Amino acid sequence: METRRILMRSLAVAVVIASVIWTTTAQDKKVKESCCTQVSTAKLTDPILNIRLQHESLPCVKAVIFETERGDSCSDPRQPWVKEKVKNFRAQRNKP
């Protein structure tokens, strides 16, 4: 009887550990594929279709994501040119 109780506890602990590991690895893969893990300081010259702001949540870094026809570009939000692009994009979008 005691052996059966120990076996059931061990099995429950193993299931919890396995589910935590599985959930953690699934989330890591999803996050890494959908966020910027580093930013560029190079000026963007492509026409901007949309802008997204990304907050820091490791492994993701704080970034401005410019969506262009050639794909997404992760830019440093502290760069003066980035601030200007965001300001101009929002002004264009708010025009009647």
Image: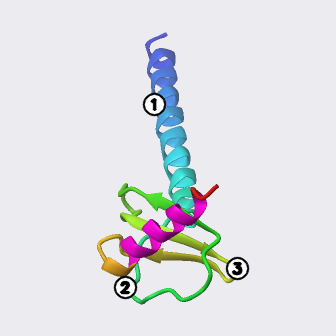
Q: How is the image coloured?
A: rainbow
Where is the C terminus found, in terms of image quarters?
bottom right
Residue at mark 2 to residue at mark 1: CA–CA distance: 48 Å
Q: Nearer the viewer, residue 76 or 45?
A: 45
Earlier in the chain: of badge 3 and badge 2, it is 2
Other-residue count near label 3 (Cα within 10 Å), few / some / many at <14 / 14–19 / ≥20:
few
Check disc 2 and report its element: helix, strand or loop: loop
Residue at mark 1 to residue at mark 3: CA–CA distance: 49 Å
Image vertical order of residue 74 relative to residue 27, above or below = below
Other-residue count near label 1 (Cα within 10 Å), few / some / many at <14 / 14–19 / ≥20:
few
Earlier in the chain: of badge 1 and badge 3, it is 1
User: Is residue 32 in view?
Assistant: no
Residue at mark 3 to residue at mark 2: CA–CA distance: 19 Å
Q: Disc 1 designates what residue?
A: 13
Q: Nearer the viewer, residue 12 or 64?
A: 64
Image vertical order of residue 56 relative to residue 41, above or below = above
Q: Is residue 39 magenta?
A: no
Q: Amino acid at mark 2?
A: Thr
Q: Disc 2 designates what residue?
A: 41
Q: Residue 4: horizontal and vertical position, in percent?
A: 51, 17
Q: Amino acid at mark 3?
A: Glu
Image point (36%, 75%), residue name: 76
Check disc 1 and report its element: helix, strand or loop: helix
Q: Which residues are magenta?
A: 82-93
Specify the label residue 69 is tagged with: 3
Q: Residue 25: horizontal and vertical position, in percent?
A: 52, 54
Specify the label residue 63 is tagged with: none
Q: Is residue 8 left or right of residue 69?
A: left
Q: Is residue 87 magenta?
A: yes
Mark in front: 1 vs 3: 3
Q: Residue 24: horizontal and vertical position, in percent?
A: 49, 49
Image point (46%, 74%), residue name: 85
